[in-house]
Amino acid sequence: MTSLQRRRRRGAATEPTWNERLVFARTEDGLDLQGLLATPKRDPRADDVLCLWVHTRQLHFAEAEYVAIARLVAAAGMPMLTVNTRGQGFGTWFRVENKPLLAGSAWESFTDCVYDLDAWIDEAAIQGYRKILLVGHGFGGAKVLHFQAQRARPEVVGLVLASSGSAVRDKMSEDSIDLARQMAREGRGRDLMPWGTGGDSLTSTVSADWYLARAQMYKELYGHGALPPALARIRCPLFAWYGADEPKPHRNVEAFIERMRRTATRAPSFQAMLLKGVGFFYTGSEQTIARTLIKIHDTVAGHKTAA
């Protein structure tokens, strides 16, 4: 038996119990985004609820943990689409009408996330899925929250804030506002702020333009004047989880959860979970995240997941 035949025999013994394929979406403003769709080995059903997973800052749709989670839930009977936004990676050049557009987590315009998620929900419908469990990991939680508060898409039957501190508070201080304004006045708005400005760690930063745009992001997420916080404008079931092993130098998880509970006054339900043994990036905890997603799916779908 040749080595190729041996590999084929091993592959046959471990044939995946799900299907997966790359999918693409084009936003209203002309950006091409990529995603991975993992599905049970059957055609879409009318009662399927698709998990639409949005990455955190500086990551992208094909992180090993995201793909592993997608495969696990698909094998259990729940379709999942893990997607890129314009905030993928640290910096990303997009081709828009043959012109380059600089985005990525250091240069994106936060409020433009509505174009990305609109495009992905539309693409989900093309793929046969019209009920969406919208999940935002980390800073992706702020995006899905802002999106649904703005758009109120009826396809979204549940919203999940996964390890998201940004959904309830701004991680960045005002210490560098004068520097950012000076950089913008000098025509250096796309230049990076000093390392550590990004709010996550000393290895994180953003452009001066991004830093200055926080003011608008802050108003739309946390409320301003007559505009209530985004959490107070959510009208679908709301879920949140945090990993018990996540680093918490700037976090008070119990306070986050209580603030969400008090603020989400229009959501028909709110459930929060603290996941034991789980860190922020979910490395080694993919099974736990998959089980949690399936439990949430069964709650919003009204039936148990079945392959």
Image (cartoon, helix red, strand yellow):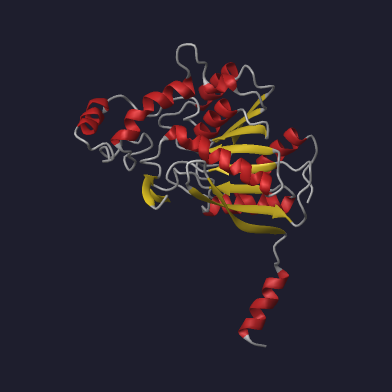
Residue 70 locus on image (x, y percent): 63, 50
Q: Residue at x 41, y 36 (%)?
A: 109
Question: Which one is nearer the viewer's eye here, 36 or 277?
Answer: 36
Q: Is residue 58 left or right of residue 305?
A: left
Is residue 153 at least partly visible in the picture?
Answer: yes
Q: Is residue 67 left or right of residue 170?
A: right
Q: For the N terminus, which image quadrant?
A: bottom right
Q: Is residue 16 above or below residue 202?
A: below
Is residue 285 at least partly visible in the picture?
Answer: no
User: Which of the 4 quarters of the picture holds residue 169?
Assistant: top left
Residue 213 locus on image (x, y percent): 36, 29
User: Which of the 4 quarters of the picture holds residue 172?
Assistant: top left
Total count of labels: 0
Q: Residue furthest bottom?
A: 1
Q: Is residue 173 above or below residue 305?
A: above
Q: Is residue 46 left or right of residue 228?
A: right
Q: Residue at x 49, y 11 (%)?
A: 226
Q: Residue at x 61, y 28 (%)?
A: 152
Residue 153 locus on image (x, y percent): 63, 31
Q: Residue furthest front?
A: 97
Question: Which one is nearer the viewer's eye here, 201 or 215?
Answer: 215
User: Which of the 4 quarters of the picture holds residue 295?
Assistant: top right
Q: Residue at x 50, y 50 (%)?
A: 32
Q: Is residue 14 left or right of residue 201?
A: right
Residue 113 locus on image (x, y percent): 49, 36
Q: Is residue 236 above or below residue 75?
A: above
